[in-house]
Image (spheres, grey):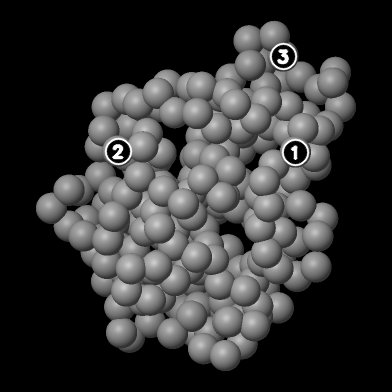
Amino acid sequence: MVIPDRLSIFPNQSPTRIGTLSALVWDNCTNALGVTHSYHIRLNLMDSQLGIDSPHHSERLSNAATFVRDGLNMNVDAAFSVFNSKIIPNNLGITSNKTYKGYKEPEQGEILFMYGIGSKGRLHSAKVVETDKELELNAPIYDSIKSTGVLLSPTEPDTKNTIFCSPGDSGAIWYNENFEAVGMHVAGHRCDKTNNILPFMYPITKVLEVLDVTMLTPEDVANL
């Protein structure tokens, strides 16, 4: 397994509020190449341009992608943006051996891993405990929505006072040991019983369906 490069995505007008770039996808409507990410990082409604931070560039790439649509009408805090013409995925470190091999539905008890900006690249693992969890999500850009997704928990039941995700991880992919994408990270949820900050994610199949996009395969990326 090769871990994808840590790529952050940010609104041009709010460079300090960042999230993690999710999946490389095709737009089912236009066949344009783009990315999925959390919607709530778009704090400036007047600016549809997003930037990308990559380890392969010494400076931030402003105007790297243009916002196209979101999933808020389905209570899904996810968005899709199309790469602008100057952006070549390979230059961002998105190569075929760092592309998820596929995707699948989450399963109860499944162990997943996440690599996000907020957690500073540390590999976290957690297991699926609730596949139909409803949470009220809050963000300045949309106030609040009731959203249904998947709640993860520690792999050991007696784990306490542990943070499994951090601000900036929004949008990161949770994946399994077969390097298949399973979910997109949305937020942290504090568990009153253990004081853990637990990850809340959307099934990746739900994100792809709501945004009407298709995830690229390693073969697709190799042929770009």
From the viewer's side, name the closer residue of 118 and 137: 137
In this rendering, position of residue 157 left or right of residue 195? right
In the rendered image, which residue does mark 3 sit on?
194
Q: Residue at x 48, y 80 (%)?
A: 89
- In the image, 177: left or right of 40? right
Q: Secondary structure at mark 2?
A: helix
Q: Residue 183: x, y in percent?
A: 61, 47
Assess disc 2: are there few (<14), some (14-19) or many (≥20) residues with their C-alpha within 10 Å of its C-alpha: few
Q: Amino acid at mark 2?
A: Asn
Left or right? Give the position of 132 relative to 82: right
* Residue position for label 1: 107
Q: CA distance from mark 3 to mark 2?
A: 34 Å
The relative height of residue 180 versus residue 167 in the rendered view (above or below) is below
Q: Which residue is mark 2?
A: 73
Say which quadrant the N terminus sits in: bottom right
Looking at this rendering, what residue extends furthest in the top direction?
Answer: 193
Q: What residue is drawn where x is 54% and y is 66%?
A: 215
Hey, which residue is sitting farthest left in the picture? 46
User: Which is more foreground, mark 3 or mark 2?
Assistant: 2
What is the crowding at mark 3: few (fewer than 14 residues within 10 Å), some, or many (at least 20)?
some
Image: 71 above or below 199: below
Q: Nearer the N terminus, badge 1 or badge 2?
A: 2
